[in-house]
Amino acid sequence: MLYPELFKQLEAVRWNMDRDIPWDRFDAARLSDEQATTVKMNAITEWSALPATEMFLRDNRDDSDFAAFISVWFFEEQKHALVLMEYLRRFRPDLVPTEDELHAVRFEFDPAPPLETLMLHFCGEIRLNHWYRRAAEWHTEPVIKAIYETLARDEARHGGAYLRYMKRALTRFGDEARAAFAKVGVLMASARRTAQALHPTNLHVNVQLFPRDTVQSRVPDPQWLDQWLNRQIRFDDVWEGKVVERILHNMGLLMERSFASVQELNRFRKEVAARLSAAGAAPQAGAA
């Protein structure tokens, strides 16, 4: 089992909201209304770990080890929402999310292939780590800068934990896992070719609720994410390139070969799909 070791590792570096956040350094003159509003939107987005956890537990009923790890992931992600809300409670109480605003992002996700979902959330942690690092640079108020730096480190550790389960999946499922990981890897490393931000909270997950079936479509301002990325934290091609590099690097570690581009990863995906087809097996069906 991976859970006992991962629990110890994450427990050893867990931060305390009272002791480790420099609340006494708050500088009201360095927090704009625009910046404070983005904190509210990120707090609500982090709250969506709740329906994601319900999805993970439902779709991984045969994997108690992974489900146990999700208990730690869920705790830490909800703590992210809580520390952002605590920041607002202390310094901008008019922007604290209401319970109704939080509950709006709790809705059922359609079942999806677990291996694809695992890879999707691994890539999501990489992307969110980079988004939060950039947010820490954009903000001018010292306390929220420190909070985003703290959250970014958590997201990186979560990505590392997901990677451990991906390595385990390769030993259990072989080419089926390779096909699932490569398929989603190509998607998540292709943000330059899409009009939408490629993160789990911005993807459609319930066909019956379309088009209000993304987390971002259910926050108070559904357009905020694009504005945050493009005009506020300015997550440009350089930063996007860092995300793609990390996805390709980790796929190379998993598959024991290097991928210099998304095109190379896509060729590998086709190779694995051909092997599965020749062997009479099909890659996991369904959308991530």
Image: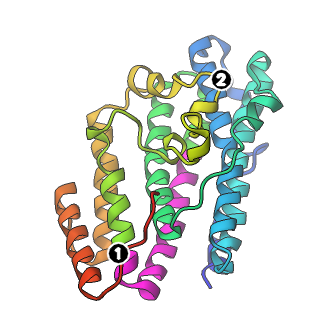
- Determine whether, in the image, residue 125 is placed left or right of residue 191: right
The residue nearer to you, when weighing 222 against 227, is 222
At a point 50% along the width and 33% down the height, the residue shown is: 136
Tally of numbered discs:
2
| Contact (Cβ within 8 Å) of mark 2 with mark 1 | no
Q: Is residue 32 visible?
A: no
Q: Give the image quarter of residue 219.
A: top right
- Determine whether, in the image, residue 277 is placed left or right of residue 200: left
Where is mark 2, residue-wise? 220
The residue nearer to you, when weighing 137 against 176, is 176
The type of residue carrying mark 1 is Arg
Q: Position of residue 61 (x, y in %)?
A: 68, 75
Where is mark 1, residue-wise? 178
Q: Residues within 10 Å of mark 2 (few under 14, many from 20)?
A: some
At a point 70% along the width and 45% down the height, the residue shown is: 107
Question: In this picture, which residue range is highlighted in magenta?
Answer: 151-177
Residue 93 vertical placement versus 210 (above, below): above
Residue 167 vertical placement versus 194 (above, below): below
Q: Position of residue 249 (x, y in %)?
A: 29, 63
Q: Is residue 169 magenta?
A: yes
SS under mark 1: helix
At a point 31% along the width and 38% down the height, the residue shown is: 194
- Determine whether, in the image, residue 125 is placed left or right of residue 53: left
